[in-house]
Each structure stands twice: as C-alpha cells, then as structure tokens.
Image (tube, helix red, strand yellow):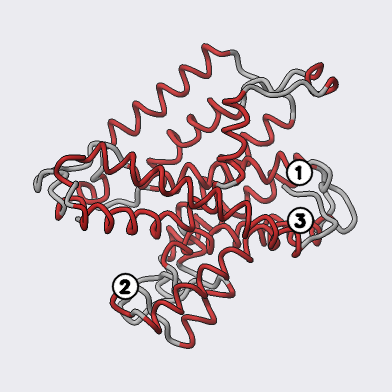
Amino acid sequence: PEWRALGAVPQNWTRPFPWEAGVDVFFVISGFVMVYASAGLFGRDGGAKLFLARRAARVIPLYWLTTALVLALVALKPDLMRSAVATPDMIAASFLFIPWTRPDGLVQPVYTRGWTLNFGMFFYVVFAAVLALRMGRRASVATTGAILLLLIGFGLLVHPATQPLAFWTSPILIAFVMGMALGLARAEGVVLPLPARIGLLAIGIGLFWFVGGDLAMRTGRDAAFVFALPSACLVAACGLGPGRPKDRERDGSPSHWLTRAGESLGDASYAIYLLHPFAIRGTLKAIDISGLGPRLGAAGLTIAALAATIALALVSYRFVERPLTRLARPSAPRT
C-alpha cells in the first residue's frame, strides 16, 4: 500500500509469488539448524538445559529490546504504531512468548513480527523436552517430529478455538518437522550432487510460482501444507550440499568473499527479520519526502529498502545483538 501511494506500482498490481511463504522456509531452516547444531547434546546429561540456555540467549535479548522500543513508540508516538496493542496482558504474553488474542481478534504480540518467535520458542521447548529424555539423535528427532505431528492432527480434528492451544496445533508446525528430517539427513552425512540440488531448487521455485500469491484467498485453505514441500526443496538444495573442504579448514585458508558475505548476512539474519519494518518505513518516508517514488519504481524502492535493512541489521548485530548475546551466555559457544 505504501508503494502504491508513492506511485511506484500500479493500483491493480497483484503478487505472482507467495512471498509470505518465507516464514515457512524460515521454520524449515530452524528445524534443520536445531538438529544439525545440537549434535553434541543428544543423549547428554544437561543437554536440554544447555540447549534452552543457548536459544534464550540468542532469541530473547534483541526481541525484548525491540518490543521495548515498540512500547516506547506507542507511548510517545501512538500514530506510528497503530497496529500495536499494549494492554497489560498483551505485554506480559509478548515477553513470555505466549500466543494471546488481542481485542481485535488477532493472535499477535505487541510487536507483531514476534508471532513467528512464538512458534519458534514453542518448538524449542518441545525439542528441549525430548532432549531431556537423553535419547540418541535419530530417536530424538523422530520423537519430536511425532509430537508435532500429533499436535497438528489434534488441531485438525478438534479445531480448538482458544489460545494458546489453537496456535500450538497449527499446521505450520509441519515445517519444523520437515526441517528436522533434512537436518538429520545432513548430520548423517547425506550430501546431494549439484545437479540434484539444482533440480530441487527449480522444483521449489516452480511450486511456489504455481501456487501464486493468493492461495488462501482462492481456496480458503491453510497454506502451511502447500508451502511445506517447496520450502523443504529450497532448504535441501542449500543444506545438503558439500561443506567447506576439510583441508582448507585445517590450514586456515580464507573463505571466498561471497562465503564471508553470506556468513555476515547469516549472522545478522535475526536482526534483519526483527528490524526490517523500521528500515523499510524509514526508507519509504525518506523517498516520499524527496518525491523520488515514481522515478525509482518498485525495483528502485526494493533495492533502497533492502540496502537500508541490511545496513541497519549489520550495525545492530555488531554493536547490539552480539554483545547482548555474549552477555547472556558468556561461556557458551554460539549455535
């Protein structure tokens, strides 16, 4: 809507691609990373506690800080944060990652982007509970996946109307299951050749393009099941490739600049997610004031907003997020 107001896109423009499926891709990645990065925690005494400590240190500081910023804006400039609901119960639920229904019926925290973190933290709790059983990696992944699938099945059969039960039985949990399966495959040494990974990439993009950007509107169905397969294809195409050669790891040879750039963006990915609305709105406001919207067009606005988002995220990661994470777990290696 903001871009249409700036004259950068036509009024009748529709989305040919389901960009909202990025959330599903993110959840698949999360399941993949949790299994792969927790290799030393399966079957280990205290593994569940260490896992939760690492996740809390990685997720909580920047999110709480961002939520506090939103609350400050609500108090000082309520017209800038019209979508935020800052009642006492909503504030408490937001800081505790508990899905809570707002007065307008939406199930979103004070900072609306945090709804995905509510899913993520629930997944972490289930994953940690299974880790506490001190089973092996395969059994832990299978058990966690079975629990999530049972929750999805319960939700489909019962259709709970109350929160947080309805939230915790959402079909989107299947993305974590598929991500864990891929993470287990990678941890077990499964590596796909380049042609196979290119094929998976093409399949994933093709399926997303076929679905289009208005699936829920056209079918009235939850898109989670439809998005899960192409999301898994994209993650498999990237995650099941060969790692860095062992000889280069041993001799300390520098990585390619593209690899280093990718690692930097990966480090800042959490900040990108949390802070991108601020960067985009700031960029659009600046362009609106300058009157350059029609000249830049959708492509120019996208590039400008993307550059601002990446710059803000990199600075935030370097000077805010990383110090806070280190403070939260000074002696624990990051995951």
Which of 74/191 is in front?
74
Label 1 is placed on what type of residue?
Ala
Q: Are marks 3 and 2 in contact (CB under 8 Å)?
A: no
Q: Give the labeled residue for mark 2.
A: 80
Q: Judge left or right: residue 94 versus residue 14.
A: right
Mark 2 or mark 1, which is nearer the start of the sequence? 2
Q: Residues within 10 Å of mark 3 (few under 14, many from 20)?
A: many
Mark 2: few/some/many CA within 10 Å (<14, 14-19, 20+): few
**Circle number at residue 139:** 1
* Residue that extends furthest to the bottom in the rendered view of this protein: 88
Label 1 – label 2 distance at C-alpha: 48 Å
Report the side of 172 relative to 49 (left or right): left
In the image, residue 281 above or below residue 41 = below
Residue 62 location in percent, x, y? 59, 63
Which residue is at the front of the view, 225 or 97? 97
- Residue 326 point in image, percent of width and height: 75, 58
Give x and y (percent) for residue 130: 74, 55
Nearer the N terminus, badge 3 or badge 2? 3
SS assignment at label 2: helix
Residue 73 appears left or right of 11 = right
Task: Give the number of the disc on residue 35.
Answer: none
List the residue tagged with mark 3.
51
Give SS at disc 1.
helix
Q: Which residue sits at x=43%, y=86%?
A: 87
Of circles 1 and 3, which is in front?
A: 3
- The answer to which quarter of the image holds residue 328 is bottom right
